[in-house]
Image (cartoon, grey):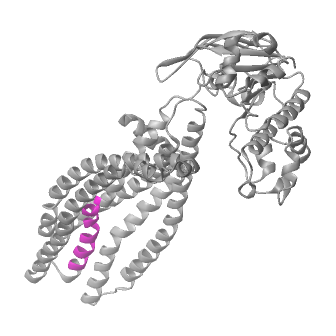
Amino acid sequence: MARDGSRALLLSTAARVRGRLAALVALMVTRALLGLATPALLAASVKAALDGGDAARPVALLGAAVLASGVLDATTAPLSSSAVGRAGAWLQLRTVSHLLTFGSRPSLPPGDATARVVQAAPGVAGLTVTVASSVISLASSVVALGLLWWIDPWAGLVFALSVPVVVLVSRRFIGGATAAQADYMESQSALSARLLSALAGARTIRAAGTVAAETDRVLAPLPGLASAGQALWNLQRGTMWQLKLLIPLTQVLVLAVAGLGVASGRTGPAELLAVSGYLGLACGALAQVDILLEVAQVRAGAARLAEILDRPGPVDGTRPGLPAGGGEVVLHEVTLSRDGMPVLDRLSLLLPAGRSTALVGRSGAGKSLVAGLIGRLCDPDSGQVLLDGVPVDELPLTELGRQVTYAFDRPALTGTTIHEAISYGSRGAKRADVVEAARTVSADAFVRRLPLGYDTPLEGAPMSGGERQRIGLARALVRPARVYVLDDATSGLDTVTEAEVTEALTTRLHGRTRLIVAHRAATAARCDLVAWLEDGQIVALAPHTELWRDEDYRAVFAAAGTPARDGQETAGV
């Protein structure tokens, strides 16, 4: 990601908490002013006591400054945490929301995306507070140096001689640390992505006896991770020893010069206390390397987050809604490529309103992409998709989501309970609606056998693949939509259960438009029409009984593992 992208991200994150940030800066500035006043008040108190004058006023002011500093410290910490927390929550929500808009579009691997959000967002959220604190501390150090110089010019001169050395060391450090940190985070993301994919296929790996080989694959990024970490550590070590030596040496030399000033009568004992106090404040500027390391880490993380946010997601439509209609869907000369290879080539298809259409084709033909076009889970490279005469890209995504609903072969169930999993995305769905949808897809019986029925936590509800599919189907049925897209959503059911569920769906969704991605001849036979997808185009749109006479059509189901006799037995259904 270009530097401009990460800079814009940092600025927009800071803008989300500008009110809290302004209050925090005001408190920090006040605290810094009190810190600058404290050495002077201490010196005045000591001088008054040594000279036999009235020390009550400077002592009272000193006590008030110390008390106020304590109150400000206690106030600043929670306000800082609040600002960082709100900024981090907004940034994570923005990034995750953007990732979810991609649907089936190519994006980052889940492990890589997760690592970026978890690693980078907290640092980016806190950078503004860190920079503000660092800038105020630096300004305070500069003022302290000026006061130190005013009290004892020789002590100020000795301190000033160390500043160019610190600047040179810090500049060299920040440049190398940013590159090393970026390499480190990239290796971490690669490791996370491989681990996540391995955990998702743990049973397959165990059954195949490839645990050792898979472990080697997952851990392959470790050498790069170790190398980047070693480079970062070496860089930090090489910088730190120089600064850890330089800062105490500077303090010793400054105090020695100030002490000689007292011995020679150039300054008094009270001024020596002031010099000591301002020296501590001035040294704050020399101890900013830890901040520089944090800045390097955040810059690398911000660039990685900006890479996600810079990926263009779907453009939301602005049309207020759809006209009255029965859910007719038209795909007109749609072309869609993946990885530079055309999958759909000027494909045209009409899904009649209120009818059921099966979409069949060989594995890899692009059936799920065709299904995803209707609800904008993916967008075509060219061509149009229309719902009741309206281009779907003109509709707001939320409105399109209400009109087109999906059920998938491997549904991701979201929510804390079975009820929430079925009602997910359906605001106002009541228990009666959930139960009715579950009964339609033959899920009510097994749900009621669970310990708490519909209130059973998802984590405590062991379900087979077919049972999960039925929950996914019930979730789609709860939503009153114009178009229902069932992407191989009954593949996990046995033949008898599938027939029962299909019959119930036909009755429940009578008069609604349905597109059913089918791998079984029996599923295609129960639909009004079959759209046959081959070589990126629809080669035929006809009833299953007519297409079954074509040997190539029958071969589609043979390749998918459907016995020929199933097609013959159901051809007349």
Please report the residue visible at 74 percent of the width from the left and 10 percent of the height from the top.
541
Q: Looking at the image, can residue 165 be seen?
A: yes
* Along the viewing direction, whichever of 559 and 323 lies nearer the viewer: 559
Place of residue 562 in the rendered image (x, y in percent of width and height, measured from the top left):
71, 27
* Residue 22, above or below 511: below
Q: Main secondary structure of the magenta part?
A: helix
* Residue 66, above or below 506: below
State the image quarter where residue 471 is shown.
top right
* Along the viewing direction, whichever of 232 and 362 lies nearer the viewer: 362
In this view, the residue farthest toward the front is: 565
* Along the viewing direction, whichever of 467 and 519 lies nearer the viewer: 519
Please report the residue visible at 65 percent of the width from the left and 20 percent of the height from the top.
393
Quadrant in which the N terminus appears: top left
Please report the residue visible at 42 percent of the width from the left and 76 percent of the height from the top.
66
Place of residue 196 in the rendered image (x, y in percent of width and height, measured from the top left):
52, 48
Q: How many marks?
A: 0
Is 506 left, or right, of 473 in this rendering? right
Residue 287 part of the magenta-drawn span:
yes
Place of residue 270 in the rendered image (x, y in percent of width and height, measured from the top left):
23, 81
Is 425 left, or right, of 125 in this rendering? right
Place of residue 137 in the rendered image (x, y in percent of width and height, measured from the top left):
34, 60
Residue numbers of the magenta segment: 272-289
* Residue 209, above or below 487: below
In this view, the residue farthest toward the left is: 264
Q: Looking at the image, can residue 317 be seen?
A: no
Residue 510 part of the magenta-drawn span:
no
Please report the residue visible at 46 percent of the width from the left and 77 percent of the height from the top.
67
Quadrant in which the C terminus appears: top right
* Residue 569, above or below 250: above
